[in-house]
Image (cartoon, grey):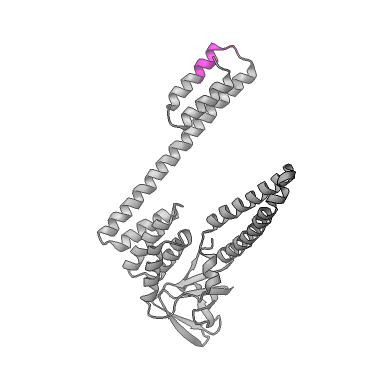
Amino acid sequence: MKPLADSAFTLLTIISAGLWPIATARDFIERVRSSNPMPNIFRMVCDGSRTVLFLLWVGFATCHLRADDLSSSFEQANKLYEQSKYSEAAAAYGKVTKAGKVSAPLYFNLGNALFKSGQIGHAIISYRLAERLAPRDPDIKANLRFARASIHSPTAPSRNRWHDSLDALTLDELTVIAMAAVWIWIVLLTLRQMRKNLADTLKGYTMTAGVVSLFLGIWLGLAAYAHLESRFAVVVVPELVVRYGPLAESQSFYTLRDGAELTVLDRKEIWLQVKDASQRIGWVQSKHVALIPPG
């Protein structure tokens, strides 16, 4: 028989691949214990292995059941949408998002259901969250444009090409690309140190990789700041009066419709200082808008 360490490793590999039931694995360990006179330390390892295997099985089973439940909820929401029960579908999609299972298709479907049920502001928020996860998806962009156009007034905060470039990739994509560039730079530096005969040949590549890594690092930092520090809100009531000051008695400045997008500048108790697409700055009550989660 192979040493216990090898047997345990093989056993864990087989179980993790789903090739052996947990009961069979437990019997295997019991046979190992009974057929081999082992020192106490090995008995402790064997007992520990049983505990680890049990915890792995519980974890796999829990994750599998939770995934099945969320998938079932998503399919049920799709059926409600197909039956034109848009409010119920929106509630069902929202339940899935609250469970932590978020994705671009989920937010996209939620946005469609909200838009069909007349909740334009909440629909725009869902489309923007979907766009954050899939910034190059043409369907998401098209539906977001359509929702904004349905308001018949400037709604989105003004943006320039620089802001658009920051959102061309997700933060995860930028992080992977930046890390890959840094690793390439480190490998080239290491090769130059280890192979002196290649130092001159690799000099240009190393400098280029270093510059690219620096550029991507700056891009990642700015994109992270834009995603995590910038605060946006969307009007979610049919009509919202923006006032000059953070008081109910303050003079009215202008009016916004459901779906208007705002940049949040400051907060004072229940009031938010906001800026609209026309660069007008005023105050609104926080209960009349929904904040877009950072990230």
Tell me what residue is drawn at x 57 percent, y 73 percent.
269
Q: Which residue is depicted at the point 50% across and 72% down?
A: 286
Above or below — where is 67 with respect to 259?
above
**Which residue is more in the foreground, 61 or 174?**
174
Instruction: Quarter of the image for the C terminus: give it.
Output: bottom right
Say left or right for 118 vs 5: left
Q: Classify residue 286 as left or right of residue 106.
A: right
Residue 35 covered by magenta stretch = yes
- In the picture as drawn, the residue positioned furthest to the left comes out as 83
| Front-most of residues 197 and 281 | 197
Where is residue 39? Give x, y as percent.
64, 15
75 left or right, relative to 169:
left
Question: Residue 223 in the image: x percent, y percent?
Answer: 58, 63
- Numbered-mark total: 0
Q: Which quadrant of the figure has residue 215?
A: bottom right
Indicate whether residue 182 is drawn in magenta: no
Would residue 42 be found to the left or right of residue 198 on screen? left
Looking at the image, which is closer to me, 221 or 27? 221
Magenta segment:
29-37
Residue at 37% over, 45% down: 69
Above or below residue 15? Residue 187 is below
Secondary structure mostly seen in magenta is helix
Q: Position of residue 34 (x, y in %)?
A: 53, 13
In the image, what residue occupies the spot 59% across and 66% down? 229
Q: Residue furthest bottom?
A: 251
Above or below 147: residue 224: above
Residue 116 pos. (x, y %): 31, 67
Q: Is residue 209 above or below residue 57?
A: below
